[in-house]
């Protein structure tokens, strides 16, 4: 049975490798080729449905890089719109404003993509237009209004969506001050946004405080900035931090050695891929999440430093589109008083193995990221608010709930620091329902039981539960916790492995740089538990 589990897990890994990160693989290929993912322009990522004719705009048209351009004037007071013809001396851009009138432009594709998607820019029309040209080739319309985000934006949106039938969720392009406009309108109208591509952007404080409106609706962000841009520290970095903490999908590209200019990328394929893929709808929630759940995103934020030959520079990439992205569901089963968090793999491994832990999973949790790739669910147990209920009761209730949903009957117990003590305490109370225990700089103290885990290891040894600790050599708890546990467990006949990270203290609470021995230990333990 152990062999069958391992073979099945290998099969799932092969499926996951293809299914999990098709988009991330395209982007990695794009990185390797300098932003030119093969065949991506031929992909139809805008959803199901037939391509159709562009929206029926009227008025005299001009040409914009081979596509039909229609110009309009919006009355600044009445917000009425009338068509005009662009002056020949404007070329592909615009030359100023008419007093009391706002310049508006629509460029139409040769053939509209399903749903008539469109991009919206609120400043600097025709500046670094390569992403919009690529989007036109993919069936997007291009919209522009020469105005800060206010009532004219609302009127322009209503005209394009209601009269001309463009998508209710435009994709925003915001360069510099145009980023402030994009974030202002998007955070005020979060249901009407598919994504934001922001390039060395600004953001107003009011919009910064409302970013949660976008994360709640899973609006992805892509920021491209120069490493020497003076704006990024006060704008992009705060956005990135807030968005990650709220569980939103944000990807950041830092162009090494560049300032505020030039904007964009010479090859816009990666940007256009991001914007078109952002139109895809999320799949249904798993049954175990119930109806009252919150969905967020979990992904690594590790930096990669890659050569982009076509850009003639190195770019630091991090975030959702450059790593595997997983759905995280937060919900409260009827049987618990506290919330539960479950990170879901792309494809569940046979038997639905899972990790049971007390602490939330950090984005640098290399072991958990590796286990997600291999089809494990990662579960954070509840912390009850009701003083009449114990943590043990809550965890027992969650365990029953999840195995009734088809999860494995023997989870992997895991914890870092003091949270490891809670994982140990539950395992000691349920030794026959555990496959193994993994701890990072563990402190074996718990609020779950009166007898502390360090003094009650016998049930685990008797059940044959294998233990694995990773500790810093300078961790102040190493001598009194892990080394004591190691001695006592071995005396009880139990198996424990201790890996020491030389020169490290209590932090970082993380796996060794080479996490493969830990991952191998967990997979073997799960297989062994399944064979009993």
Image: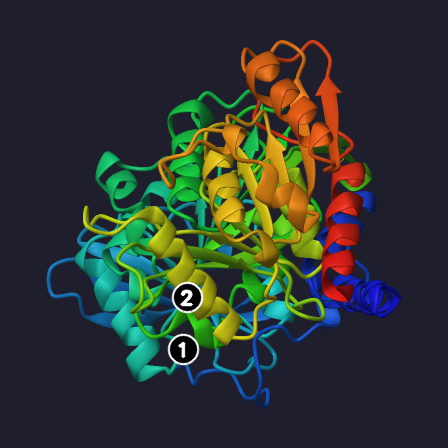
Q: Residue furthest left?
A: 77
Quadrant housing the C terminus: bottom right
Q: Which residue does the image show at 24% across and 70% down from the upper left?
A: 81
Q: Which residue does the image show at 26% across and 58% down from the upper left?
A: 337
**Residue neighbourhood size for the residue with mark 1, other residues' Cα within 10 Å, grouped as few (<14), some (14–19), many (≥20):** many
Residue 101, given in percent of the width and then of the height, sits at 22, 57
Residue 166's tag is 1
Against 5, residue 488 (above or below) is: above
Residue 261, given in percent of the width and then of the height, sits at 55, 30
Residue 210, given in percent of the width and then of the height, sits at 25, 46
* Residue that label 2 marks: 170
- Report whether residue 249 is seen: yes
User: Which quadrant of the structure image shows residue 254?
Assistant: top right
Instruction: Count the marks.
Output: 2
180 or 65, which lies in front? 180
Q: Is residue 194 left or right of residue 476?
A: left
Q: Secondary structure at mark 2?
A: loop
Instruction: Tell me if label 2 and label 1 are in contact, CB under 8 Å.
Output: yes
48 or 300, which lies in front? 300
Q: Is residue 162 left or right of residue 170?
A: left
Residue 396, given in percent of the width and then of the height, sits at 41, 59
């Amino acid at each position: 049975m152990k062999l069958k589990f391992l073979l099945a897990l290998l099969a799932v890994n092969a499926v996951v490798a293809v299914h999990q990160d098709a988009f991330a693989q395209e982007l990695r290929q794009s990185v390797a080729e300098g932003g030119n993912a093969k065949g991506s322009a031929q992909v139809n990522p805008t959803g199901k449905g037939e391509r159709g004719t562009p929206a029926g705009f009227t008025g005299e048209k001009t040409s914009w890089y081979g596509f039909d351009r229609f110009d309009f004037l919006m009355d600044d007071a009445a917000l009425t719109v009338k068509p005009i013809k662009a002056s020949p001396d404007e070329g592909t851009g615009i030359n100023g404003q008419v007093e009391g009138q706002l310049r508006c432009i629509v460029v139409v594709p040769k053939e509209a993509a399903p749903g008539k998607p469109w991009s919206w820019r609120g400043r600097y029309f025709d500046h670094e237009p390569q992403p919009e040209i690529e989007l036109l080739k993919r069936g997007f319309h291009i919209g522009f209004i020469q105005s800060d985000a206010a009532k004219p934006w609302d009127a322009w949106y209503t005209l394009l969506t209601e009269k001309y039938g463009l998508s209710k969720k435009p994709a925003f392009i915001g360069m510099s001050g145009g980023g402030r406009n994009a974030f202002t309108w998007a955070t005020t109208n979060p249901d009407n946004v598919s994504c934001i591509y922001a390039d060395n952007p600004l953001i107003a404080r009011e919009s910064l405080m409302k970013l949660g409106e976008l994360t709640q609706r899973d609006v992805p962000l892509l920021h491209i900035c120069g490493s020497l841009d003076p704006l990024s520290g006060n704008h992009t970095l705060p956005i990135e931090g807030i968005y990650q903490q709220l569980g939103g999908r944000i990807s950041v590209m830092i162009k090494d050695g560049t300032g505020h200019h030039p904007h964009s990328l010479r090859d816009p394929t990666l940007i256009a891929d991001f914007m078109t893929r952002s139109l895809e709808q999320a799949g249904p929630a798993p049954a175990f999440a119930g109806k009252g759940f919150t969905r967020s995103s979990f992904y690594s934020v590790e930096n990669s430093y890659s050569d982009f030959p076509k850009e003639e520079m190195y770019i630091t990439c991090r975030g959702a589109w450059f790593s595997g992205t997983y759905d995280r569901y937060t919900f409260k089963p009827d049987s618990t008083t506290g919330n539960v968090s479950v990170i879901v793999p792309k494809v569940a491994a046979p038997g639905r193995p899972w990790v049971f832990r007390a602490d939330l999973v950090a984005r640098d949790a290399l072991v958990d990221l590796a286990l997600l790739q291999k089809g494990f669910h990662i579960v954070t147990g509840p912390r009850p608010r009701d003083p009449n209920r114990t943590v043990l009761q809550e965890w027992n209730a969650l365990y029953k709930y999840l195995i009734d949903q088809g999860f494995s009957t023997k989870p992997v117990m895991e914890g870092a620091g003091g949270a490891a003590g809670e994982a140990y305490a539950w395992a000691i109370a349920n030794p026959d329902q555990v496959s193994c225990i993994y701890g990072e700089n563990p402190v074996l103290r718990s609020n779950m039981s009166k007898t502390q885990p360090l003094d009650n290891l016998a049930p685990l040894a008797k059940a044959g539960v294998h233990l694995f600790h990773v500790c810093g050599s300078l961790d102040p708890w190493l001598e009194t916790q892990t080394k004591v546990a190691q001695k006592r467990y071995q005396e009880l006949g139990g198996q424990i492995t201790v890996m020491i990270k030389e020169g490290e203290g209590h932090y970082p609470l993380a796996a060794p740089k080479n996490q493969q021995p830990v991952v191998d230990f967990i997979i073997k333990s799960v297989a062994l538990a399944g064979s009993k």
